[in-house]
Image (cartoon, rainbow, N blue to C red):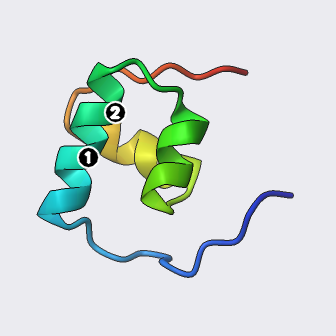
Amino acid sequence: MGEKFERHKQAWTSDEVQKLHTLAKKGMPLRAIAKALTRSEESVKARAKEDKLGIVSLR
């Protein structure tokens, strides 16, 4: 399947949110952002949607 993440259902820290915004604005793809934040792609996608960020999905 995919990589396992031990951070299941953990709250986002302000540093993680800031990094998400920075990486999304640079045009990084979803998979790369998820890996950089050690979060699942679904978690990153949900947070990006919540913050109204556009993220490139290379599928």
Could you say where residue 5 lies in the image, as x and y percent from the top left? 61, 72
Secondary structure beneath label 2? helix
The answer to which image quadrant residue 24 occupies is top left
**Residue 45, which numbered label?**
none
Asked if residue 58 lies left or right of residue 36, the reply is: right
Q: Amino acid at mark 2?
A: Leu
The answer to which image quadrant residue 40 occupies is bottom right
Q: Is residue 3 visible?
A: yes
Could you say where residue 29 lies in the image, as x and y percent from the top left? 53, 27
The residue beneath circle 1 is: 19
Asked if residue 23 lies left or right of residue 43, the reply is: left
* Residue visible at 39% across and 45% down in the picture: 46
* Residue visible at 19% across and 67% down in the picture: 13
The residue beneath circle 2 is: 23
**Mark 2 nearby-residue class (10 Å; few <14, some 14–19, many ≥20):** some
Number of marks in the rendered image: 2
Q: Quadrant of the C terminus?
A: top right
- In three-dimensional space, the C-alpha distance between marks 2 and 1, rounded to whole angstroms, equals 6 Å
Q: Amino acid at mark 1?
A: Lys
The image shows residue 50, relative to residue 8, as above or below, that is: above
Asked if residue 14 lies left or right of residue 9, the reply is: left
* Residue visible at 66% across and 20% down in the picture: 58
Contact (Cβ within 8 Å) of mark 2 with mark 1: yes
Relative depth, front residue between 54 and 35: 35
Q: Is residue 42 visible?
A: no
The image shows residue 9, relative to residue 40, as above or below, that is: below
**Mark 1 nearby-residue class (10 Å; few <14, some 14–19, many ≥20):** some
Residue at the far right: name it: 1
Q: Quadrant of the N terminus?
A: bottom right
Secondary structure beneath label 1? helix
